[in-house]
Image (cartoon, rainbow, N blue to C red):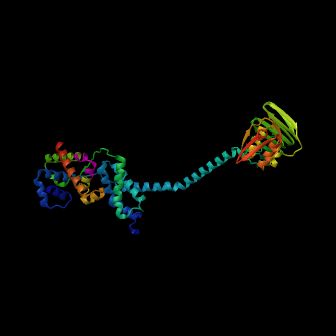
């Protein structure tokens, strides 16, 4: 055990928080769509990490955090139906388009939002980790503790049901 | 399938512009790309990194606070244990002290005021140690010899009556509805139902089935059983056998003998053979001992 890589050291712990907290928070938000709950769960995960810092080596800290976050989420809100409220952050390039086009775009975004909210939690989490977080399949597979093939499958399923859902709205 | 592979390449951010162009030709994949692009434009509400970190540190330090209060909590715990032990001690202290003897066993008990009680075989006494100075009361079942220190009234409670004294030596026999009090020194007062009888030194009193029998006795200084002997004066053979069984672990069979016949004498507690001889010989009876089975039978019939 290298002393300078000890999670129990405050500077190391703070570093882990800076690097991972936001991503874990969003991961939880993709799952539950509730800011306050995501806050609580992130805090819970980091408190658990501190309490177990002696047992968790630095390289395992990230997966420890995701696992604890996921388990706590499953314990607390098993399969509660939630509606996501994604804030819109659109590229500036559409500014010179016609008002008609802008309105259509806006309606389309709304539809995508609703469709994403209606995905299964597993599909939504994988899909948004890739789309919003920009995470590669390999990383998603690691965090969710599934194979890359399974991530591909979830992504495909997510797109298929989003397309259907948007067509129906 | 080929297009699915390309789609995943796009999503994984490792595609070439050519590959994207290929997918754009297919309306289905074109719409997938549009959904994917739109979705990446979304953003979650912002995460307040600072506030959450502060909460984590607060929650962690509040847990430490709890652990800091632990020494006090364990002090409380110790206090609780002491309280329980103290209560238990007081409770046990207030319980009756009990002394019991088995077959062929005598015990001498020194009471808190230095009074002495010697228990004969198969007897029990119970008394309260804690309040002894104020209330000298002892419960007796069986037989016991008392040497009472001078002081307040000393009561011996038996199912047949209460014997009260003020410093003396006396023997109380309370078995089978019979109360037999022998006084060796001082004065004993016996209360049975509504009757109060005083038994002076050198006298004994027998209460059996409501009849009282008071009699002068020989100048002995203590009962014979204290010296490992049981003596009996004009009692049933039955009673003598009962007494014998208290001092020897035996079963007694009586074959063809009138057990109501009266007998006087004594037997030793030290040797069963001699004890049986001293009971049987005067009545012309014979006996056999086999293991712990004693059979008494009339000589004439054999």
Where is residue B218 shown, x and y percent of the image? 89, 42
Q: Quadrant of residue B51?
A: bottom left
Q: Nearer the viewer, residue B171 or B88?
A: B171
Furthest residue in direction left, as rendered: B25
> Which percent across, then down, holds residue B281?
82, 43
**Is B234 positioned to the left or the right of A160 in the image?**
right
The magenta region covers A115-125
Q: Is residue B230 visible?
A: no
Q: Is residue A122 magenta?
A: yes
Query: Viewer-proximal residue, B260 or A43?
Result: B260
Residue furthest to the front: B302
Chief secondary structure of the magenta span?
Answer: helix
Say left or right for B213 vs B12. right
In the image, taking residue A157 as reference, residue A56 lies left or right, namely right
Q: Residue at the spot x=34%, y=55% of the render?
A: A67
Figure quadrant of the N terminus of chain B? bottom left
Q: Residue A28, position in %: x, y?
A: 32, 52
Please tell me which residue is depicted at 69% across the width and 44% down the height of the picture: B94
């Amino acid at each position: 055990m290298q002393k300078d890589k000890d999670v129990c050291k405050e500077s190391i712990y703070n570093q882990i928080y800076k690097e991972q907290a936001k991503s874990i928070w969003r991961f939880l938000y993709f799952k539950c769509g509730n800011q306050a709950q995501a806050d609580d769960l992130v805090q819970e995960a980091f408190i658990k990490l501190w309490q177990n810092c002696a047992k968790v080596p630095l390289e395992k800290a990230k997966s420890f955090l995701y696992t604890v976050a996921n388990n706590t989420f499953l314990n607390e809100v098993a399969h509660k139906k939630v509606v996501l409220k994604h804030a819109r952050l659109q590229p500036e390039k559409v500014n010179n388009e016609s008002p008609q086009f802008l309105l259509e775009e806006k309606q389309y975004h709304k539809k995508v939002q609703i469709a994403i909210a209606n995905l299964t939690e597993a599909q939504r989490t994988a899909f948004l980790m890739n789309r919003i977080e920009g995470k590669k399949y390999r990383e998603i597979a690691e965090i969710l503790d599934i194979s890359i093939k399974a991530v591909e499958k979830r992504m495909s399923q997510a797109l298929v049901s989003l397309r259907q859902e948007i067509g129906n709205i | 399938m080929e297009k699915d592979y390309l789609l995943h390449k796009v999503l994984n951010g490792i595609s070439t512009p050519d590959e994207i162009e290929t997918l754009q030709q297919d309306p289905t994949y074109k719409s997938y790309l549009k959904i994917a692009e739109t979705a990446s434009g979304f953003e979650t509400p912002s995460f307040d990194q600072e506030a959450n970190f502060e909460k984590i540190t607060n929650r962690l330090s509040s847990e430490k606070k709890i652990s800091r209060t632990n020494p006090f909590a364990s002090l409380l715990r110790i206090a609780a244990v002491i309280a329980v032990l103290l209560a238990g001690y007081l409770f046990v202290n207030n319980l009756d002290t009990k002394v019991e003897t088995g077959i062929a066993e005598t015990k001498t008990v020194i009471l808190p005021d230095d009074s002495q009680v010697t228990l004969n075989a198969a007897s029990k006494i119970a008394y309260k140690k804690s309040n002894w100075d104020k209330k000298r009361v002892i419960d007796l079942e069986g037989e016991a010899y008392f040497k009472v220190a001078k002081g307040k009234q000393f009561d011996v409670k038996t199912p047949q009556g209460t014997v009260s004294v003020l410093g003396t030596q006396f023997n109380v026999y309370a078995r089978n509805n019979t109360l037999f009090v022998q006084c060796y020194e001082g004065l004993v007062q016996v209360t049975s139902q509504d009757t109060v009888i005083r038994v002076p030194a050198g006298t004994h009193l027998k209460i059996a089935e409501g009849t009282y029998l008071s009699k002068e006795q020989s100048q002995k200084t203590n009962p014979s059983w204290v010296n490992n002997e049981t003596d009996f004066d004009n009692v049933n053979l039955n009673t003598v056998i009962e007494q014998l069984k208290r001092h020897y672990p035996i079963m007694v069979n009586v074959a063809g003998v009138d057990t109501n016949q009266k007998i006087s004498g004594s037997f030793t507690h030290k040797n069963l053979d001699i004890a049986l001889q001293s009971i049987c010989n005067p009545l012309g009876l014979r006996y056999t001992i086999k293991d712990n089975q004693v059979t008494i039978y009339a000589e004439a019939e054999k």
